[in-house]
Image: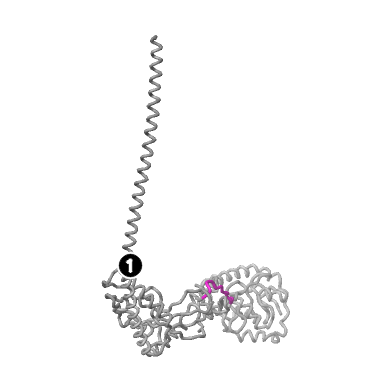
């Protein structure tokens, strides 16, 4: 056999050996996997069995413990119920002795007593037969007896407790006479309460924004009991509760109410009387600090009133009343008033008068030339006495005060003085200057003529001629109605009416 053939033969034998070993390894691996599966199943079953045994043992022990403690809990609960019922009867008798016969709601008592017993049972279960403390508000406060006071609801203004407080005063008056005042206080729980005589009053109700019928609980407690720590705790010692005698010092009364809104809004003003200068700028709304209502969140208001002005746009002196009116959604009406007193701005009046005098001087100088050119004699005034008195009336008014816009003896301005004296309809200097022909030889103006200062179309002052260069007029606030002379204050033209 050649060398090559030997190599081929040996290679075939090696491959056959390798294939045989590989198949053997596969068989071994498969056998081991089956073995592992079987062993894992056995271990899992063992663990499951052990767990079930432990669970059964735990359940058995729990059941035994419950069976052992259950009679004790039942016994303790019955004892507690009996003790609380006895104390409740004592408290009820005490209330009846102090406040008279009250209505006792047996169903309410059973429910609250059961609540107290359950609280005790829970406490006992977790603390054993040892000594413990629980809050008296949890155990005992619900045993309070609420006495209904009325079937027909009393009317209560929304946000106003006064009607309910009157009921509380009536109850307290059975024990004492000092119930005239009710002082608002803040209670220990942060809510609002009232102090009436020697008692503290709390109103329990469901907050509402609706105007409807509801029930309010009035809770009355003596100041001494309210301030004492003894009413805040009740001790449980073994199976016998030790309860303070004054734990039941809170007395509750149920009042049926009907919330209504009959209260008018409140208009708040920063001032009720203000002084204003005749040159000022007055805004009545600037004095309103707010409009408030017990029920409506927003209430609008109106303002009525006005300050009179003269022809120069200045306020006329005097007192003026502004009325503020507000009406809420339920028709409740409120009013407030502000009185405004207008007086002269003396500094401004002085400046105006100086400007007028300067204008008059300049007008007089320019009018002298026109007077020399026009010397036409004016007619003599006729029947002046038939017109409101004429000159005689004017002279009788000398000494009357000067008032801007005035047209009566209480006060005149220049045109108002002429209007009153002659009984004419024209009110202003311009309207009066248009009543007749203009003449410029003012030094010859007859008695009863009207003298004017300023231009023909825009005169600013008027007086009544007395003849011979003299006149009477409403001059200034400083002089009032007085006499004058053309020598010192010369007019520009005159008319005859």
The residue lying at 69 percent from left, 80 percent from top is 425
For this view, does 347 lie left or right of residue 470?
A: left
Say above or below: 15 vs 389: above
For this view, does 97 lie left or right of residue 296?
A: left
Which quarter of the figure has residue 187? bottom left
Q: Nearer the viewer, residue 210 or 480?
A: 210
The residue lying at 32 percent from left, 68 percent from top is 67
User: Does any portion of residue 369 appear in the rendered image?
Assistant: yes
Which residue is at the far left?
130
Colour scheme employed for the rendering of this structure: one colour
Which secondary structure dominates the residues rendered in magenta? loop
Circle 1 crowding by C-alpha within 10 Å: few under 14, some 14–19, many from 20: few
Residue 273 belongs to magenta span: no
Say above or below: 161 vs 30: below
Say above or below: 3 vs 224: above
Q: Nearer the viewer, residue 347 or 228?
A: 228
Q: Nearer the viewer, residue 233 or 398?
A: 233
- Image coordinates for residue 429, horizontal then vertical, percent: 65, 75
- Image coordinates for residue 463, horizontal then vertical, percent: 63, 78
Image quarter in which the N terminus is found: top left
Q: Secondary structure at mark 1?
A: helix
Residue stretch in magenta? 295-306
Residue 303 belongs to magenta span: yes
């Amino acid at each position: 056999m050649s060398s090559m053939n030997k190599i081929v033969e040996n290679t075939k034998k090696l491959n056959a050996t390798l294939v045989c070993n590989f198949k053997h390894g596969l068989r071994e691996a498969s056998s081991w996997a089956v073995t592992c599966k079987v062993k894992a199943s056995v271990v899992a079953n063992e663990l499951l069995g052990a767990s079930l045994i432990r669970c059964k043992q735990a359940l058995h022990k729990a059941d035994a413990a419950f069976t052992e403690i259950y009679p004790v809990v039942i016994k303790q609960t019955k004892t507690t119920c009996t003790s609380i019922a006895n104390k409740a009867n004592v408290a009820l008798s005490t209330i009846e002795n102090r406040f008279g016969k009250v209505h006792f709601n047996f169903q309410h008592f059973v429910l609250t007593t059961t609540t107290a017993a359950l609280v005790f049972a829970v406490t006992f279960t977790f603390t054993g037969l040892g000594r413990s403390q629980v809050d008296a508000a949890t155990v005992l406060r619900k045993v309070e007896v609420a006495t209904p006071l009325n079937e027909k609801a009393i009317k209560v203004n929304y946000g106003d407790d006064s009607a309910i407080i009157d009921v509380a005063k009536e109850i307290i008056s059975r024990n004492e006479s000092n119930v005239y005042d009710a002082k608002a206080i803040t209670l220990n729980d942060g809510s609002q309460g009232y102090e009436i005589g020697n008692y503290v009053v709390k109103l329990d109700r469901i907050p509402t924004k609706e105007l409807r019928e509801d029930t309010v609980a009035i809770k009355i407690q003596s100041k001494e009991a309210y301030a004492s720590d003894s009413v805040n705790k009740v001790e449980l010692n073994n199976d016998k509760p030790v309860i303070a005698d004054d734990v039941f010092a809170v007395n509750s009364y149920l009042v049926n109410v009907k919330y209504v809104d009959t209260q008018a809004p409140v208009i708040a003003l920063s001032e009720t009387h203000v002084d204003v200068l005749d040159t000022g700028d007055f805004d009545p709304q600037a004095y309103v600090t707010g409009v408030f209502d017990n029920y409506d969140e927003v209430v609008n208001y109106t303002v009525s009133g006005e300050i009179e002005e003269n022809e120069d746009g200045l306020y006329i002196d005097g007192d003026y009343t502004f009325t503020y009116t507000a009406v809420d959604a339920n028709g409740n009406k409120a009013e407030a008033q502000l009185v405004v007193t207008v007086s002269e701005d003396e500094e401004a009046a002085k400046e105006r008068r100086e400007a007028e005098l300067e204008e008059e001087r300049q007008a007089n100088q320019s009018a002298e030339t026109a007077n020399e050119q026009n010397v036409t004699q004016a007619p003599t005034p006729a029947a002046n006495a038939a017109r409101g008195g004429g000159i005689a009336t004017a002279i009788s008014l000398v000494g009357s005060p000067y008032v801007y816009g005035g047209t009566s003896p209480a006060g005149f301005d220049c045109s108002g003085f002429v209007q009153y004296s002659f009984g004419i309809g024209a009110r202003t200097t311009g309207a009066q200057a248009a009543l007749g022909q203009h003449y410029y030889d003012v030094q010859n103006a007859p008695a009863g003529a009207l003298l004017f200062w300023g231009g023909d179309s825009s005169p600013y002052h008027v007086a009544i001629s007395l003849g011979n260069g003299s006149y009477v007029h409403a001059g200034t606030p400083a002089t009032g109605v007085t006499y004058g002379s053309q020598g010192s204050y010369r007019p520009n033209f005159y008319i005859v009416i």
